[in-house]
Amino acid sequence: MDENRLIHELTQGLQMAQQLKVNLHSHEAREVLIQKILSSYENALLVLRSGDSAGKALPACSLRPESSISIGSLGSEEFEFEQPVSGQQGQNIISKRRKNSPTIWEKQVRISSPNGLEDNTDDGYNWRKYGQKDILGAKFPRSYYKCSYRKVQKCLATKQVQRTNDDPTVFEIAYKGKHTCNQGDQLASPPPPSPSSPEKHEMTPTHHRQQLSPPSPTEMLPTLKQNLSVNTSDMGGDNVPSSFSSPSTSFGLIEDHHQLHFPNYNDDEELLQVYSPPFISPSESNSFMEQGAGSSSLDFLADVDPDFEFKNFFL
DNA sequence: GAGATTTGACCAGC
DNA sequence: GCTGGTCAAATCTC
């Protein structure tokens, strides 16, 4: 049994319950917190029942649609990912692209990385870079990533990272496909027995917060209130997340312009632990911390579906 | 040596 | 033919 994981989940549930107590008046915060609490305790139960990590018992990604984010109709979106092919490219009969339809991205975010390092675009998942391409009209090449667990767990999630023209420190990240791997749980627990040594991704100089004990949400609250906002200015009117909320702060109500800004936290890794990206499930609550002690600001421009919910900022 | 990254080439769509 | 997306051999890193 993964005792640490069990403790982690229970602790999370407790913290969320405490936040719920504080935010009972906020309908949206209440919803989010209830989800998180349920998720935490479900995971704890899974650990207990399985005698192993919850990740084995239930892939974290499978929890997502219910417990973390909903991405509108994307759940029914079918992508024509390349199937495992044998032989050389010339023998590859299956299309490498979707046919008869444009590439539809499930999610697009914009992340500001003050030091300009792509490392800071890490979202907690383990990605394997499989290509880089110069894009017409773009000053910087676009990087292509697949889920590191593509082979092992047939996870078809991909993402593209593109440095913006106007601001090289800002990365636009587009996600495609859904994670069907169990990275989420594994991220919250000791490194997985992955054949691809994901710790290389996760434990880069900015990726060592797994050893850190997360600050209590209540400790984070004052600072967050001062500094957090989410920029959704790129969203169409329909894309404004209807249920974005912060479990512990008052910025749960959506405005047209929401900008996350985390000033001067370069040296405060623990503080960064709070800023989980909106698309990380509760069970992955610690994952985003790994992406960058060097980050001092993050802009999430979630160009997403109406149902997109920023539910995972606090864990 | 295993796994990750780089990079040139291939492929499909336009 | 151009472009974006992907493959896979070569190379790098640990």
Image: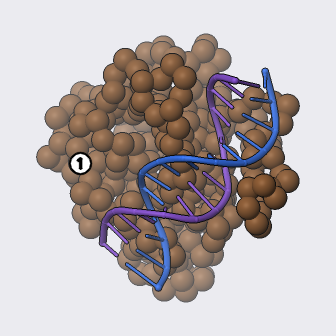
Chain colours: A brown, B blue, C purple
Left or right, residue A66 beside residue A79: left
Residue for point 58% across, 41% down: A175
Q: Which residue is mark 1?
A: A293
Compared across the picture, whether B5 is left or right of A88 comes to left
Quarter of the image for residue A103 reads: top right
**Residue at the spot 21% in from the left edge and 31% down from the top edge:** A263
Indicate whether A213 appears above or below A73: below
Circle 1: residue type: Ala
Q: Quadrant of residue A230?
A: top left
Residue at the left extreme, as displayed: A267
Q: Residue A38 appears at what percent x and percent y?
A: 56, 58
Q: Visible in this render: residue A203?
A: yes
The relative height of residue A227 versus residue A153 in the rendered view (above or below) is above
Query: Of A168 and A31, which appears nearest the observer?
Result: A168
Question: Given the image, what chain letter belongs to the residue carrying mark 1?
Answer: A
- Identity of the residue drawn at 56% across and 26% down: A303
Along the line of sight, the residue nearer the viewer: A204 or A109:
A204
Does A86 appear above or below A259?
A: below
- Quick one: SS at disc 1? loop
Task: Say few, some or many: other residues with alpha carbon within 10 Å of mark 1 (under 14 / 14 to 19 / 20 or more).
Answer: many
Total count of labels:
1
Q: Which residue does the image show at 51% across and 57% down from the upper left?
A: A128
Could you tell me residue A30's position as x and y percent? 51, 40
Q: Position of residue B13 (x, y in %)?
A: 81, 30
Is residue A35 among what the camera can see?
A: no
Rendering coords of residue A37 (x, y %): 50, 56
In the image, A279 versus A252, the foreground residue is A279
Q: Is residue A123 left or right of residue A240?
A: left
